[in-house]
Amino acid sequence: MLNINELYEGQQVYVIYRNPHTPTVSTIQEATIARDPMNPQQLSLLLYDFYHPIDEDDAIFASQASAETLYDEFMM
């Protein structure tokens, strides 16, 4: 997993995303690190055209393969 202090604007990352409508369903999604338009000092995940604040407990990965490894370990 990536350290949130090492993230930079424009970086392509992969996240394990839990479906808000079906909490038991999670997928690996590609996201972009972007400035939050409501708070330009804060970096956010741009995912599905929405800005999500980055939290310490977010699972953010540099590659899809590394995300899949952790996903398989905990979700299967």
Image (spheres, grey):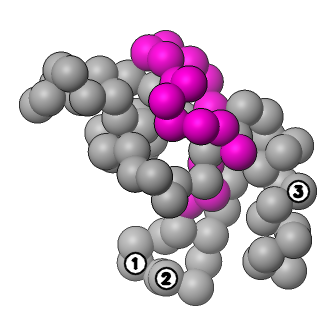
Q: Which mark sits nearer the N-terminus, 2 or 3?
A: 2
Q: What residue is drawn where x is 86% and y is 68%?
A: 72
Identify residue type, mark 2. Pro
Q: Is residue 50 left or right of residue 66?
A: left
Q: CA distance from mark 1 to mark 3?
A: 25 Å
User: CB atoms at circles 2 and 3 under 8 Å apart?
Assistant: no
Answer above or below: position of 74 versus 29. Answer: below
| Residue at 72% in and 32% down | 62
Is there a contact, CB below 8 Å, between mark 1 and mark 3?
no
* Residue 14 seen in this snapshot: no
Tag nearer the camera, 1 or 3: 3
Judge by depth and name the residue closer to the eye, 57 or 71. Answer: 57
**Which label sits in the foreground, 2 or 1?**
2
The number of discs equals 3
Q: Position of residue 70 (x, y in %)?
A: 81, 60
Q: Which residue is mark 2?
A: 23
Give the quadrant of the N terminus: top right
Instruction: Tell whether position 2 is magenta.
Output: yes
Image coordinates of residue 49 in percent, x first then y, are 35, 37
Would you say the residues marked 2 and 1 are in contact, meaning their CB atoms lie under 8 Å apart? no
Magenta-tinted stretch: 1-17
User: What is the C-alpha distance between the residues marked 2 and 1?
Assistant: 6 Å
**Residue at which label 1 appears:** 21
Q: Which badge, 1 or 3, comes first in the chain's sequence?
A: 1
Residue 64 visible in rendering: yes
Crowd band around label 2 with a 10 angstrom C-alpha radius: few (<14), some (14–19), many (20+): few
The amino acid type of the residue labelled 3 equals Thr
Q: Which amino acid, mark 1? A: His
Q: Is residue 60 magenta?
A: no
Q: Which label is found at residue 69?
A: 3
Q: Nearer the viewer, residue 5 or 61?
A: 5
Mark 3: secondary structure: helix
